[in-house]
Image: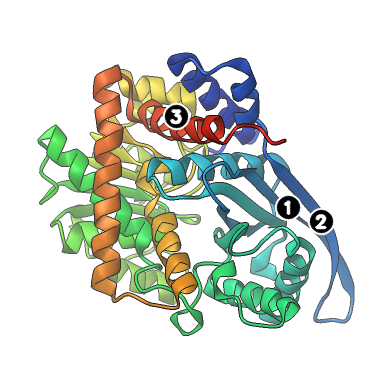
Amino acid sequence: MANTESSINPFETAKQQIDIVADLIGINDGTREVLKHPKRELTVNFPVRMDDGSYRVFTGHRVQYNMARGPCKGGIRYHPQVSLDEVRALAAWMTWKCAVVNIPYGGAKGGVICDPKHMSKGELERLTRRYTSEISSIIGPEMDIPAPDVYTDSQTMSWIMDTYSMQKGYSVPGVVTGKPLSLGGSEGRGEATGRGCAYVIRESAKDLGLRVKNGTVAIQGFGNAGSVAANILAEEQGAKIVAVSDSKGGIYKADGFNPRAVEEHKRKTGSVVGFPGAKAISNEEVLETQADILIPAALENQITKKNADKIRAKIVAEAANGPTLPEADTVLFQKKITVLPDILANAGGVTVSYFEWAQDIQGFFWPLAEVNNRLERVMVQSYNDVHKVATERKVHNRTAAYVLAIQRVVDAIRIRGIYP
């Protein structure tokens, strides 16, 4: 995505956020150090046989950030730009995300440095199985439960589950979430991130006196989370989707698109670009569109000090991880723009992952309506918890969400004590 500032170290941003909260709620130096260090990091280098018979060595990471509240949870991404510091940052954010929605998990993240767009399905399967074998000593349903992330999906999770199960000698569906229904996946998991985001947008709009019905929405990143949020906001809440984009560019239409039609166009052509009747715009212009609600659903570091002043939305709901830099937060807060931070706005995915894991452990599965009702309850409660802290402390929502989450993790660390 354009606008990414490659010089920004995401883990430094994550630690900066911890310091802001630690100063605010008076966390002692020792606990602060614990919060700023991952519990465990594993880097593996492993050979994979390519389709032409040659071998390539790939590097993968798995970082378990904090386990004070329960087993670790977090996705695995396949991307050429995966770095250890990126994985550390994402694992930290997963720790706070699980805590802010009050589910009994710590945070983890994984990644393999590769370009899946230039690999066959067979090569991806062999890479996945080998990576799984390398990290299998530190994952498991009671220890660390991976999930899909950038360029991984339910098929990737199936290969991980099968590889891990073969090593155990019996099926272990609870080792990963985001699986197909036929292997113990949960109803509603695929759309959970976008649906959860739509729920917190609705709750925030109520507090702001903003009508979502006929309100305008711009979405940077029309992938899974962005497209699902668009469909739910349009179909269930009556919003107008006026601008969307993907990695190839963006489109704008003042009187709104049918997001299902845009999805179909993207399925056929590979991009939203060229949608009939739409004006072509850049990814930067999507962020700066005149719209009531902006949903950054792409990559990190999209809203920066350089463009924060050009954001015109009333609500910025972060369906992506880390799209707004700390200095941009200050600008948005001064402009009275309500930011629904990533650790709240996109926590629907990990919430339904938790439901999937709980169902796998029990071997008892819930219908879609029950999954969505439970998700709605968690997201509404979590939004209200964050809003209450923000109002009481007169801080913006990100700081409030971090206060809530970090306090919950600190309480768990304090009550458990340090072993031995």
Q: Which residue is rendered at x = 51% and y = 74% of the image?
A: 179
Q: Position of residue 200 (x, y in %)?
A: 26, 46
Distance (Cα) linking label 1 and label 2: 6 Å
Q: Quadrant of residue 131?
A: bottom right
Q: Quadrant of residue 35?
A: top right
**Crowdedness of circle 2 by 10 Å Cα count: few (<14), some, many (20+)?**
some
- Relative to residue 29, is residue 87 depicted above or below? below
> SS for tag 2?
strand
Amino acid under label 1?
Answer: His
Sooner in the amino-acid sequence: mark 2 or mark 3? 2
Q: Position of residue 196 (x, y in %)?
A: 31, 54
Amino acid under label 3?
Answer: Gln
Q: Which residue does the numbered mark 3 point to in the structure image?
A: 407
Q: How is the image coloured?
A: rainbow
Most distant residue in the bottom direction? 182
Q: Which residue does the numbered mark 2 point to in the structure image?
A: 44
Q: Which residue does the numbered mark 1 point to in the structure image?
A: 61
Q: Is residue 226 visible?
A: no
**Crowdedness of circle 1 by 10 Å Cα count: few (<14), some, many (20+)?**
many
Q: Which residue is rendered at x = 23% and y = 54% of the image?
A: 241
For residue 21, side relative to residue 237 (left or right): right
Q: Which residue is rendered at x = 30% and y = 34% of the image?
A: 386
> SS for tag 3?
helix
Sooner in the amino-acid sequence: mark 1 or mark 3? 1
